[in-house]
Structure formats: C-alpha cells, structure tokens
Image (cartoon, rainbow, N blue to C red):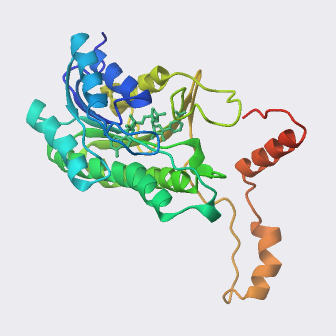
Amino acid sequence: MGNFLAGKVIAVTGAGRGIGRAVALAAAAEGARVVVNDYGVSMDGVSPTSEIAEGVVKEILAAGGEAVAVADDISTMAGGQRVVDVAVSSYGRIDGVVCVAGILRERMLFNMSEEEWDPVLATHLKGTFTVFRAASAVMRKQRGGTLIGFTSGNHQGSVSQANYSAAKGGIISLVRSAALGLNKYGVTANAVAPVARTRMSANVPMELAEIGSAEDVAALVVYLLSDSAREQGITGQVYTVAGPKIAVWAQPRELRAAYASGGWTVDKIAEFLPGSVGVDPMPMLSRLQEMERAAREGSRPNA
Ligand SMILES: NC(=O)c1ccc[n+]([C@@H]2O[C@H](COP(=O)([O-])OP(=O)(O)OC[C@H]3O[C@@H](n4cnc5c(N)ncnc54)[C@H](O)[C@@H]3O)[C@@H](O)[C@H]2O)c1
C-alpha cells in the first residue's frame, strides 16, 4: 500500500468490473476510502445486480481497506446524487469522483434506434453529469476536489458507434466546462481515454498495437486524484493511457482563418474557402481507408 491518496474519499462509478474496479482497488490501496458504484449490468446495459459492486467492496475490505457499495444507476439524477450522499454520510467528505461507468449499443447510424441512442448517452454523458453535479456542489463548499471523466479515442468519430462517440465527445466538453467553472473553487477536472483489456475492448475487430491493463489506467487515475497532480495545476486535460504510452490530447483551436471585407457571399466563399481555409485531414478517415484496403487484401488490419 502506498499513501498517494491517504485521507481522501473517492467515489468510482462502474467500479464493479474492468477499469473501474482497478481504479477502486488502486485508490483503496493508496489509502483512500472508496465508494464503489456499479449497477451491475451486461455490456449493453441490462439485467442489473447489486452483487457486482458488493464483490469489489469485499475485495477492498479483505485487503484491509475501507469501502462502501452503491448499486444505483448513475444515469438518473437520484443515482448520481446517492453516490455523493453515501460518500458524505459514510466518510464526511468527497475529494474525488471518477466516472467510469459505460455501456455499448453498436449499430450503423442509418439503422440506429432511439433505444440504442438514448441509454448510451444517458449512461456515459448524463451519468458523468449526474455525479459531477452532485460532487461539485460539495467540492465548491470544501474549496477543493477532483473530477475525472472517462472518454475514448473514439471521440474523434466511430464507424458503427455514433452514440458512444457523441457521448465521449460530450464528456470532454463537460470536463473542460467543469475545469473552467470550478477553477476558482480549487476543483480540477480531467478526462482519461484508456485502451485496456476488459470485456468492453474484447470485441474490437482489429489488432490494437497499443493496449495495456486496467491497472495501467488505474495508476494514471490515482495520480490525477493525488495532491501531486493538483500541485502541478493539471486541469482541463485529456490523457490517453495505452499500455506503455501516456499521451496528452491537444486543446481544440482554430487552425486557419480567412477574412473578407464587406461580408460573405456564397460566391466569395466558393472562391476563398478551398485555397485559403481548406480542410484539416481526418486521421480516423485515413486509418479507415487503410483498414478497408487491408480487409480487401484479406489481412487483419493493425490499429
Ligand atoms: N476498455 C477499453 O479499452 C476502453 C477504451 C475506451 C474507453 N473506455 C471507457 O472506459 C470505461 C470503462 O470501460 P471497461 O472496459 O472497464 O468496461 P466494463 O464493461 O468492463 O465496465 C463498465 C462497468 O460499468 C457498469 N455500468 C454500466 N452502466 C451503469 C450505470 N448506469 N450505473 C452504474 N454502473 C454502470 C457496468 O455494470 C460495468 O461493471 C467506459 O466508460 C468505457 O467507455 C474503455
């Protein structure tokens, strides 16, 4: 056991399995008292059971740590609030929340139903909002705290998971908004885009060149929750952790601009835009085209 998080109270959603479980165990091993939230659902978000969260609490207690289970659905306002309420009623405060809970409902955009769109947005994006909302109200009064959202490299776009990609893009904007809005209260907010072997990544139809374990991701999360990261002023950032690699994503910014006097007309834009503003080539599209070429040639593409 280390002491990176000694004295801190940390809540982790989706902490019953995969990356969330590794985060909860690592936080407890570093001295945190942990709220283990998991609705205990299948990968597409059905058939809840409270045993999944309770199992991880037992593991933490057996290792000599302190933890309490919350088996609520964080896609509801009441569920998100309860995660934070249980932290405060059990341990008196909340120093960090880590929103890991997620589900998948894969479908091409032209076939995607409302039942495939809504629960995915509700679990990832609203499920981050509900917990951030409840936690930030307490952290504002405490004058400190750390919010961590879980995004994905797929926030750049996805062939058959537009729902997931849109939710993950939204989480980045939510995290940056939290970083801006809560900065003056001493609250930091960051996002993690992991690549790790779990049930969720098991069905990716390509060889992932850079992939690691849930424990690699947990180590980064513990660091972001620690006073060391807070002292460095780390906020509003998106980090990928993929096996041996940790990378920081660029902040969105305008790439090139053109100006016209006298207002724009369609004619002026047609003349101006291609040459002077142009496009920013989409890395995911080039990769997709390479993968399609490899598939046509009968080889399994690398990513
Ligand atoms: N594994 C990867 O390589 C990878 C890549 C990119 C992003 N991610 C993201 O990391 C996070 C964790 O993924 P994982 O691979 O550990 O998945 P996982 O399926 O192993 O675990 C997700 C957990 O979330 C729980 N959950 C689902 N809906 C919930 C709800 N409404 N309330 C509370 N708990 C709920 C599930 O019961 C499950 O235990 C997800 O947000 C995922 O999108 C993972």
- The answer to which quarter of the image holds residue 88 is top left
Question: Residue 126 at what x, y percent from top left?
Answer: 36, 55
> How many tags in the picture?
0
Question: Residue 288 at what x, y percent from top left?
Answer: 76, 47
Report the residue at 16% width, 35% height from top. Answer: 87
Question: Residue 163 at what x, y percent from top left?
Answer: 53, 56
Residue 257 shown left or right of residue 44 in the figure:
right
Residue 140 shown left or right of residue 195 in the figure:
left
- The answer to which quarter of the image holds residue 27 is top left
Image quadrant occupied by the C terminus: top right
Image quadrant occupied by the N terminus: top left
Image quarter for ligand 1 = top left
Residue 284 shown left or right of residue 55 in the figure:
right
Question: Residue 115 at what x, y percent from top left?
Answer: 46, 60
Residue 175 in view of the camera:
no
In the rendered view, would you say 16 is above or below 295? above
